[in-house]
Structure formats: C-alpha cells, structure tokens
Image (cartoon, coloured by chain):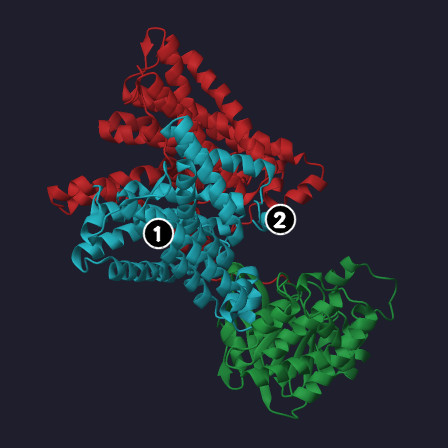
Chain colours: A red, B green, C cyan
Amino acid sequence: MAFASGYFKTSYKSDLSLVETGTHWVFLSILIIGLVVFPFISSVFLLDLANQVFLAFIGAMALMLLTGYAGQISLGHAGFIAAGAFTTAILFKEMKAPIWITFPASGIVGAILGIIFGLPSLRLRGLYLALSTLAMHFLVTYFGSEYETKRGFSTGVVISPPAFGPFKIEDPRVWYFLLLSIDIMALLFLINLARSRTGRAWSAVRNREVVAEALGIKVSFYKLSAFITSSVMTSIAGCLFAYYRGFVSVEAFSLFMTIQYIAMIIIGGLGTILGTIFGTIFVVLLPYSIDMIGKMLHVPARLTTYMFAIQYASFGLIMIIFLVLEPGGLVSVWNRIKNYFIFWPYRYKPLER
Amino acid sequence: MPQATGKLLLNIENLEVVYHNVSTAIQGITLQVYQNQIVGLLGTNGAGKTTILGAISGFLGVDDAKITEGFIDFQGEKIHNRPPHEITLKGIVLVPEWGKIFEHLTVQENLDVCVSSGERHLKRKDLYSRVFDYFPPLQMAKKRLAGYLSGGERQMLSLSTALLCGPRLLLVDELSLGLAPIVVGELMNLLKVIRDEQQITVLLVEQNALAALEIADYGYVIENGRIVFAGSPDRLRNHQDIQEFYLGQGARESRKSYRDVKQYRRTRRWYG
Amino acid sequence: MQLLINTTVLASLYCLICIGYVFIYRATRVLNLAHGELMAVGGYFIFTVALSLFSKPIPSFFLACIFSMVLGFAIYFFLMRFMAGESVFAAVLATIALGILLRGLITLIWTSQLWHPLQYLGMENASHRLTREAVISTFGIVKVLGAALLYLSLFFCLKFTRWGLRMRAVGENPLLASRRGIKLHKYYAFSWGIAALSGGFAGMIQACDSGLEPGMFVIGLKAFPVVLVGGLDSFGGVIPGAFIVALAEILAINYISPQASESAPFIVLLAMLLIRPWGILGTKEELERV
C-alpha cells in the first residue's frame, strides 16, 4: 500500500478509525445515500439481483474469513449453506417454527458442523484439508437428500416467508433493507475481527503455522475458531437463503455452489474485503450478463435451451482467464491502477539509500 | 578494471532486477568475467548476490522476478530473460544455495539425470570416472539415497552434476555454507583444480570472504543491491572497510554490532 | 463371489482413472480436479469416432485415445503451462475451472442425452459366466486386463528408462531439473498427455460398459478418495486404495442404499485422513509439501 500524499497517522484514535480521511467520509456518504435510494428507483428485476448479491455476500465473507485470513482451504462451503437451509426447512416443516427460532438454530447447527469440519484441519493442511472438507460436503448433502426422500419431499421443501408477529417479510424492498443491514453488520464484524487479536492470530497461522505456535499462539484453538465463525455465518446465510427462495432442495447445494463462492473470493482478490465485494457482484451478475449479451446478439431461440450450458462453460472460462492472467483478482487490477498514479512518473519504488 | 588476460566471457551491464513488480533487488550492476578466471562476489545476506546469479541462470515463474534494465551478454549473445534449461544448454550452469540435489534419487541416479542424452555410453563412463576422481566419497556412496548425504558430500554431488552438464561458466552460490572450515578449504582448492584442468570459468558468490579471496582472481563487493567496490584480491584484502566488515579485522572505536554494519554511513571510501 | 467380481471390476476402473491423478501430481504437484471430465470426454470421443468414422472397435479405440492424448497436450499448452510457477492452490483452482468449462462444452456439443457407443461399434457387452453364481461382462474383463497392462508398462518405464528417471527428477525438484538442462515443459506436457490418455481410455471403456451421459464425471470425483487412501504420490498405493474404496462402495449398494454408495468413498477418505493422512504407501513428507 503506497501513501502518496505523505499522510501519516499520529494518534491511536486515528489508527483505530475505520474511515480515515475527509474525502473517504464524502465518498462513503454518497455510497450510503445511493444504496438507500436504490430500491425506490429500480425495477423489481434489479432489486432481486441486488438482494441476491447481498445474500451471497454473507457466505462469501465467511469463506474469505476462513481462506483469506486464516488460510484454511475449504471446499465444503455449500455444505454449510445446505446445513442452515435444511435446519430451517426441517424445523419449519416438522414444528412450524418461526424465524426467531430457526435463525439461531441454524447458527447453532452451523457451529457444531464447523467443529466437525474443522477437526481435520488440526492434522492436515492445504490440499489434504481441502479434500477432507470436500468429503464432508458430500456427507452433508447425503443426509439432506436422505431427509428429502424419507419424508417424501422429493422435489424439495417449500417454506413460507418469515414473519415477525403480524409483519411478513415478503416485499423485495423489505428484503433489500434487511439483507443490507445484515451485510453491514457482518462487514463491520469482520473488519473489526480482522484487526483484533483473533485476526492477527489467524494471519500468523496462515503465514507460518510453526512459528505461530512457537510464539505462543494456540494454533488449534484459532483454526477451530476460524472454522466455527465462518460456519456460523454461512449457516445463517443458508437460513436466509431458504427464506428468500422459499424453497429448499438438495440439488441447489452442489459442488458448483462451493466453486461459485470460491470464485467470488478469488476473482475478487483473496484476502481483502474490497475483493470480496467485487467478486460477489461479479459472480452473481455473470449469468445475467451472459443472458443479456445473448439477447443483444439476437441469439436464435433454439440456442436458448443451451443457455445454462453456455453460462456454465463461460463461468469456467472466465475463472481460468482470471487465474492465468490476474491471480490477484479484481482488487489487484484496482491496485495496479492506483499504484500507477501514485508512483507516476516513476515506475517502481526506488532502492533505499 | 579486471585483467584482460583472456576472452571476455560474461558481460553484465547496468542490470536491474525487480521482484513482484514492486521490489527492486539489484540496480546498476556492471561486471565482467574473463575466460578461465575465478571471480568472487562478496557481500552480506540480502545484498543481492543470489539475485545476480539467478538473473544469469534464469528465473522460473515462481520467483516472480523480472530483469527490467540492462543486459547480460555471454560470448556475444544476450541471454537475459531466458528459461533456465536454455541457459544451461548454452554452457552456464548454476550450483544453487539450496535445493541442490535430488534427494529421493540415489547418487548414481542424480548423476544419470544430468548427463545429456546425446552422450554415447563410452563417453558417459569417461565423465563418470572423472567425477569420481575429483570426488572419491561419491564413488563410495553411489547407491545411497542423496538425501542421506552429509553437507560436504551434498556439495560435491551438486558440483558433480553441474560439471556433467559440460559448463563453460560455473556459477557457484555459497559453496561454504554450513560446512566445516577444513571441508571449505578442500572444496575451494578442488574448484581451483577443476578450473585449471577443465578450462572452466567460475563466478563464485560467497559470504566467507576469506576463503573466497584465497582462490579468486578478481572480486566485486555488493551491498544493498549495488556494486560498491571491485579489485584484485590483494586490493580487497588491504582495504580498510573490507577488513573491518568482511574479514573481521581491525575494529575502529569499538566492536560494531551487525545493526551498525547494515546502517552505517558510508564515508565514501568505496570510491577511492 | 459376484461381490468379489464386481469389486475387482470397479477397482480396476478406479486404477485406470487414478493413474492419471498420480501422474500429474508427481510431475507437477497439482491435483487435476478435471480428470473426471477428461474421462467423460474420452467416452464421448469414442462415441463420435464410432459414429462417424470407423465402426470397428480397434481403430476407433486407437483414434479416440490419440484424441484424448492430444487434448491433454492442449490443456497443458493452453492453460497449465501458465500455472507452472504459481501456487499449488491456484493451479488446482484452474483445474476446477477447466472441469467446469469442459462440462459445459460437453453438454453443448453432445447434449445431455444418454448415448450408447457400443451400438456403433458393432459389439455387445456380453455376459460371461465365470462360476456358478458369478458373471462378468466383456468390458469388465477389458477393465481388469487394461488396468494390469497399463500398470506394468508404467512401472517399467518409470523405474528403468532414462525418460522415467527424468520424470521423477522433474517431479521432485523442477527448478534444479531445469537448471540441469531438462526441458520442464516437455515433461509436464507428457504427463498431462499420458494422464488424459489413461483417463480417456477409462472413460471409453466405462461408456461401452454402462452408457454415456454428462453425469459420468462423478466417477472421477469418487476416484479421489482412492488416490488419497493409497497415497497421493504413490502409483503402487492406488491398487490397495482402489480395492478398499470399491469394496466400500459395493457393500454400501448391496446393504444400505444406492445413495449411500455415492458417499461411501468419501467416508473411507475421511477415515483415512484422520488415521493416516499420507495414505497407505505415500511418503510422509508429502504432507509438508502441500
């Protein structure tokens, strides 16, 4: 990170503050006003897109926490979402439970699952850890499908919209503000967690486990805490997912969903919050953009049946392009543009004298 | 200026290497290596010596390093920014600091890997016997897994595999690292013998300035990515700064700590 | 007895598939998660060749194998070559993305219909009686023989030829190998070509045995646990790993449910990862490598 203007922090208060300069405050206010006004000026379609982005963002942040901060690779993300969604579905169907029970219940199930998913991380690293989480993902979806077939919901469980007393959350605009506020809370939580002792411990574990242990950081505790925090967030996202869709079925929680989440944090830029934001927007909007391009190019109606395969293939292709050409993601493109202007007219930082 | 007793083999001018697009490791490096010389590159940790050798012998993608200025000329041909195997085929072979042998292969297999496939069987036997002449311990350890060799034997194996590639210029990175002084002396002498018998030129990177200056014909001193001094071994040995910081002699006011060495203000004596 | 036959046939299929995984892993330290799709593509290749060119088995198989190998080279040349210097995680992600791309392309080119290449080859997947209660299909026999043949030739090549020695050196220390004059790209491309060949061959046989549809890549996914149980860097470990996983799967189909058999390999995987993560015949150092 290069500071061009020579701006330095001179007090603890300024070091701790989230918004650093006056200019930042101005931009932030513009963003907030824009976000608040958006649902009142946009179509239902765009509103639904925005809601999907917000919903995905929670899961993406949870994954970023686990992989970007704590360095634990997990291929079982869809399993957590499935767990939250199925907990909601099961409690709703069997006991007609309202949202203020299913929401925390999803969180608790998420935490338990997080411990189970996280246990292998105490012994394994990298590829092996990723594969153990993958194995668990299949187990979770197996149990989900067993529930579906045993209870006769072979096409999925239908859930009615959540209600706080007489106030039903059905209107997309209400969802918008609900999801936006949850997103902001999660974002603040994550930013502060990253700056706290826990976040620093995770960073140490990610970089050099052995050294972290030698420094007195209880590596097992922090690994598990990373898994648990991430899984609780993701299961809650799964619960909201179930309510938003109104429908839970095991096919939605395939390996592809995990890969979409991974793409969100990789295409955006691993390890940064800005990257997660970029990545989520990009991945959620991608199928719709391809649809739009198809309509603009007047693709014959015959081919629209293949739309799903085309979207699938282009997703793979774009991910490949990013991995090969820009492994740092959209954030590194952003940084490169910024650094160009900061260093201009020099190209690199000069050697220290 | 180095003694122009032979043909100019390696000519580096104004070399600059940048890591990860933002971190300049070496800058303005200009040096020459003449045929059959042993040239030493001296400097402390992090000065940039390994980077110079890496730039000559070629980087792989994982290093994320780029030559951004200057050029490297070997026998009249520009060789910078080429992949390592091409440079080896041209006759420049590196003995790296670490990762120097194939640990899961036996000593014999290590040697087999490096002998080029074009060699006829007879010539191969010749090469092997020559290598075993220089390094007898290797012959005794032929069937042993290379990972089980001692530090000195590893260096010998690494030198042998480098020699089997038929180099004209041998780049040696930290030959003395982790070895007992007596072994260091033996290896340095062997290097000189190899240079004499095989007509191979050597560019030697060393932190152990004393050992290096024993066999070098010319020396460069590198600090913080720049060459700050060059000269014959005698000139280097008699220079006050080098005596103080690289040869450990003649402390000035008091014993300086390592921190002082890295940060002390140059009194511009280098350019004298 | 039928149980044993089924297990052996399934294990042979897994062996054929897993050669590809181990090959690429040993050469490049990358786990090729698109291998299931490479297998499926092999099946589709033989279908297309049989449909449009030859209707005889031997030339069709031969040509389809060539196509698979060329595909492997192409994948290396156009994609994995660029990941050669990046972190292992990024390279594995690239293979995941490649798998997605291939899956989409398969559906686009061949639709998701179920095909039977055997019809166009003029062959039948006949049932042969081995003992009183046990039968085995023609292609079941092909699987077993094919796996054995491939294994023996591979073992021989790696241990006793110079090419095999260099392949091992490249797998262990690519930078040093490059510095000693070995052209890395050549050996990487080879490993991808051979992996695609063996995977495609497995897919062709499977397509002839059970039919062809895009969901076939799932078999590749179930083959992971085999490599991990055997040891990611061990060719020899694949054999016991394949038998263990195949046995678990067959037992699950017979005694629990078909759905459970999909998850059975992963339960074995989990158990193995918790007890002995480096696999039956893998080397412990591999754990640290990752």
Q: Nearer the viewer, residue B213 or C143?
A: C143
Neighbours of disc 1 within 10 Å: few (<14), some (14-19), many (20+): some
Q: Nearer the viewer, residue C139 or B29?
A: C139
Residue placed under numbered mark 1 in the picture:
C142
> x and y percent of residue B171 in the render?
63, 75
Residue sitting at x 72%, y 75%: B270
Task: Determine whether, in the image, residue C52 is placed left or right of residue B179.
Answer: left
> x and y percent of residue C208 in the render?
27, 48
> x and y percent of residue C141 in the render?
36, 49
Task: Determine whether, in the image, residue B99 is placed left or right of residue B258.
Answer: left
Residue placed under numbered mark 2 in the picture:
C284
Q: Secondary structure at mark 2?
A: loop
Q: Is residue A161 above or below residue C116?
A: above
* Subunit of label 2: C
Amino acid of disc 1: Val
Residue sitting at x 32%, y 48%: C139
